[in-house]
């Protein structure tokens, strides 16, 4: 009997299993996992491997000197990069609009007039139609009294724009009700002496006139050319409960497409360039035309160009050679909420963007150095052996109910890998860019969180809404009661129920919206990549030739990704499910187990 | 003649309101303004004690379960179903307006406003 440890150094985790090898089947004693130290396949991995080996041994109750060998997979460094290129931008020159949804605008209706500062209301001629602009530091009672006094003199105050959260208070104190828009943070930038319109919709409704180009054209008597200019304003205001449009002579709102540069995909036989602004579909179609991909470059000075160069440089440094090529890219259409340049109330506009993931992989890793250092650290024989894909297949086949031909899908953090083992033992594998990290990035940017940790939690855990201090409603509609009152910052908010407790999502997005963003991000990355990967390993690109698909890797532990993939490939008559290595490990430990299995069937 | 106590019935018939109990009058105007802006009715009563005690008693008395207590220095917002020593919000009198807003938001079920008004994302309809 010999005691061995199989170690799989992955991109983000290092896994190990302890087994006794004899004449018969290997007997598995324990397993362990720890975060990978350093970039996979480099000597930096040694501390992580030592840690995981010791943990596995202590879990098995065996001493380190009983160990006869450590088996390590042929770990080749994989580096992936992510970049996003925003391709549209909304700019307001000469501030022309305020469109936002304060919780409580005041009054209702539509008012048109000339903008006048609150302090100058007394100087207005009777009969003049004005929009009153109330700046900082004016009390609501004074504001209401001032507007009432002006109205008494015959000045027609038709609407008001207010800095503080005072709209209802002011509207309640006016003799004649007018629409009031509040919480306009940059109220001092509202141009004075210009024609303007203020519209507030009844609760539960949205504005009708200012969100309609012809509505604005009617109010401001615009000619067709000017109406064309104002159309983006109307479009930006659609769906708001309140809005202000100020007509400035040179006023303009531009809906600009940013030149996002081009991506050049170099295949074995051809070389094609595609503009990033063409969108993900076009980029992926171009990729299919040039496949197999030999390299990719981005235009210098763009995010994508920079990302591709960084990925290549990092890998060149690791591999110690300058000849590093991008092996795969995945483009995903997304959108980014961005502050409208020149807006007055902190408005956001949804801008289109394309996210790109890229990966490089070298065939030669500094494995010898790793093995030597590891042998010294553990004082034991270290055997490097086995192509990773072959080992993963061997490990996956320990899942009860599987048989060849079997395909594995390894859903990791940085890359999605697939391998197909045919009945005669041939293994074909493919490594694709885009996995868990890209999903996190998409969630982070589409929700405008700017908080990767929170985005990671949203990816991993179901959502709920705190409906009272004592219960939350889960996203599937079930309720959950708590004995201790929930923290007040979670009240009425969408929360993530993670391992570390409840975490409020500090946005105004509804639960449905966040759920939809989460699921679509997973779909755009994992389902697309699963199909893409299986097509590349399947004989003749025909998914029907694959009998079983075993989903492995950290992201296979996700509560919905395996289901999304199973749904997508169900049409091809494939048995698809999450792996259960050795019937106990779930989707983990496949390669480590495969290394031990390989000893038995050389 | 039998004496019937109608007080409980009268209290039931009273329109639902948040109740504010004040030891003084400072801060009350701002609390009222916050409540009015959110559109939730408020009834004001006199009382004696600390802001926390007043708030909890007010919350217990309010048919909406939300109470506000004001003393010389502090405003406290409380919910009837929370433990007495764990109020929703306690703040200095200068933040009375915010306390009014948040007391109303407890009733209508909107997320509370934070003391330091951190900027929030607008939903994209």
Image (tube, coloured by chain):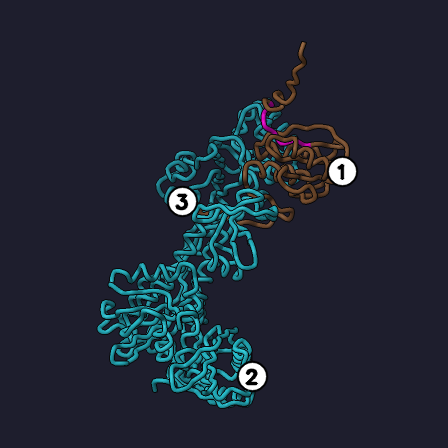
Chain colours: A cyan, B brown
- Same subunit, labels 2 and 1: the answer reads no
Rounded to the nearest angstrom, the CA distance separating label 2 from label 1 is 64 Å
Residue A380, how many percent across, how many down? 52, 89
Q: Which residue is mark 3?
A: A235
In the image, is residue A332 above or below residue B16?
A: below
* Residue furthest top as drawn: B1
Q: Are marks 3 and 1 in contact (CB under 8 Å)?
A: no
Residue A32 visible in image: yes
Q: Are marks 3 and 2 on the same chain?
A: yes
The magenta region covers B14-20
Q: Which residue is mark 1?
A: B50
For marks 3 and 1, give the one nearer the viewer: 1
User: For numbered disc 1, what is the local secondary structure?
Assistant: loop
What subunit carries mark 1? B
- Marks 3 and 1 sit apart, C-alpha to C-alpha, by 53 Å
Spot occupied by residue A231 in the image (x, y as percentages of width and height): 39, 44
Q: What residue is disc 2 on?
A: A63
Foreground pick, A381 / B98? A381
In the rendered structure, does residue A456 fall within the stretch colored magenta? no
- Mark 3 neighbour density, 10 Å: few (under 14) some (14–19) many (20 or more): few
What's the residue at 67%, 45% (across, down)? B86
Of A405 and A373, nearer the camera is A405
Chain label for disc 2: A
Residue at 38% from the left image edge and 81% from the top image edge: A25
Q: CA distance from mark 3 to mark 2?
A: 70 Å
């Amino acid at each position: 009997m010999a005691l061995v440890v199989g170690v799989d150094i992955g991109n983000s985790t290092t896994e190990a299993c302890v087994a006794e090898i004899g004449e018969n089947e290997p007997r598995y004693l324990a397993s362990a996992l720890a975060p990978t130290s350093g970039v996979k396949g480099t000597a930096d991995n040694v501390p992580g491997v030592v840690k995981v080996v010791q943990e596995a041994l202590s879990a098995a109750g065996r001493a380190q000197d009983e160990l006869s060998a450590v088996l390590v997979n042929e770990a080749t460094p994989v580096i992936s990069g992510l970049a996003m290129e925003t391709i549209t931008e909304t700019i307001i020159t000469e501030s022309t609009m305020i469109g936002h949804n304060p919780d409580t605008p005041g009054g209702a209706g539509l008012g048109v007039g000339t903008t006048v500062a609150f302090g100058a209301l007394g100087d207005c001629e009777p009969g003049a139609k004005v929009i009153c602009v109330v700046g900082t530091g004016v009390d609501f009672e004074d504001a209401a009294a001032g507007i009432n006094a002006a109205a008494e003199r015959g000045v027609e105050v038709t609407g008001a724009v207010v800095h503080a959260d005072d709209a209802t208070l002011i509207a309640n104190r006016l003799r004649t009700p007018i629409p009031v828009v509040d919480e306009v943070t940059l109220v001092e930038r509202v141009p004075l002496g210009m024609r303007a319109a203020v519209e507030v919709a009844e609760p539960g409704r949205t504005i009708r006139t200012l969100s309609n180009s012809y509505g604005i054209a009617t109010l401001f008597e615009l000619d067709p050319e000017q109406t064309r200019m104002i159309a983006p304003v109307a479009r930006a205001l659609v769906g708001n409960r309140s809005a202000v449009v100020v007509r400035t002579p040179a006023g303009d709102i531009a809906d600009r497409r940013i030149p996002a540069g081009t991506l050049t995909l170099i295949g074995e036989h051809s070389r094609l360039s595609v503009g990033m602004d063409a969108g993900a579909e076009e980029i992926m179609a171009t990729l299919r035309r040039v496949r197999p991909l030999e390299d990719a470059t981005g235009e210098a000075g763009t995010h994508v160009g920079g990302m591709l160069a960084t990925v290549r440089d990092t890998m060149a440094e690791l591999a110690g050679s300058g000849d590093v090529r991008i092996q795969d890219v995945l483009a995903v259409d997304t959108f980014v909420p961005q502050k409208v340049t020149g807006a007055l109330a902190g408005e956001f506009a949804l801008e289109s963007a394309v996210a790109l993931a890229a990966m490089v992989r070298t065939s030669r890793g500094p494995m010898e150095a790793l093995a030597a250092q590891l042998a010294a650290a553990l004082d034991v024989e270290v055997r490097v052996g086995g192509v990773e894909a072959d080992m993963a297949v061997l490990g996956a086949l320990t899942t009860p109910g599987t048989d060849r031909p079997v395909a594995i899908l390894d859903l990791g953090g940085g890359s999605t890998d697939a391998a197909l083992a045919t009945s005669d033992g041939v293994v074909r594998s493919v490594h694709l860019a885009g996995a868990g990290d890209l999903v996190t990035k998409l969630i982070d940017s589409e929700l405008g969180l700017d908080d990767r940790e929170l985005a990671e939690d949203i990816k991993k855990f179901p959502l709920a809404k705190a409906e009272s201090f004592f219960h939350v409603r889960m996203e599937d509609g079930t309720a959950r009661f708590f004995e201790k009152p929930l923290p007040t910052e979670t009240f009425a908010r969408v929360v993530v129920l993670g391992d570390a407790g409840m975490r409020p999502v500090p946005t105004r997005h509804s639960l449905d919206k966040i759920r939809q963003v989460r699921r679509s991000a997973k779909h755009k990355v994992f389902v697309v990549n699963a199909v893409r990967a299986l097509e590349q390993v399947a004989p003749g690109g025909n998914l029907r030739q694959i009998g079983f698909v075993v989903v492995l890797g950290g992201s296979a532990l996700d509560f919905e990704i395996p289901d999304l993939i199973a749904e997508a490939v169900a049409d091809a008559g494939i048995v698809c499910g999450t792996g259960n290595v050795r019937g106990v490990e779930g989707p983990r430990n496949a390669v480590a187990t495969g290394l031990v299995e390989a000893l038995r069937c050389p | 003649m039998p004496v019937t106590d109608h007080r409980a019935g009268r209290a039931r018939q009273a329109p639902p309101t948040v109740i504010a109990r004040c030891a003084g009058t400072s801060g009350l105007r701002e609390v009222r303004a916050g409540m009015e802006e959110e559109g939730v009715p408020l009834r004001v009563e006199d009382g004696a004690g600390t802001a926390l005690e007043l708030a909890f008693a007010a919350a217990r008395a309010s048919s909406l379960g939300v109470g506000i207590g004001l003393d010389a220095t502090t405003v406290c917002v409380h919910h009837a179903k929370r433990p007495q020593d764990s109020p929703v919000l306690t703040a200095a009198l200068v933040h009375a307006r915010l306390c009014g807003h948040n007391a109303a938001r407890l009733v209508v079920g909107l997320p509370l406003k934070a003391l330091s008004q951190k900027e929030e994302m607008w939903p994209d309809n």
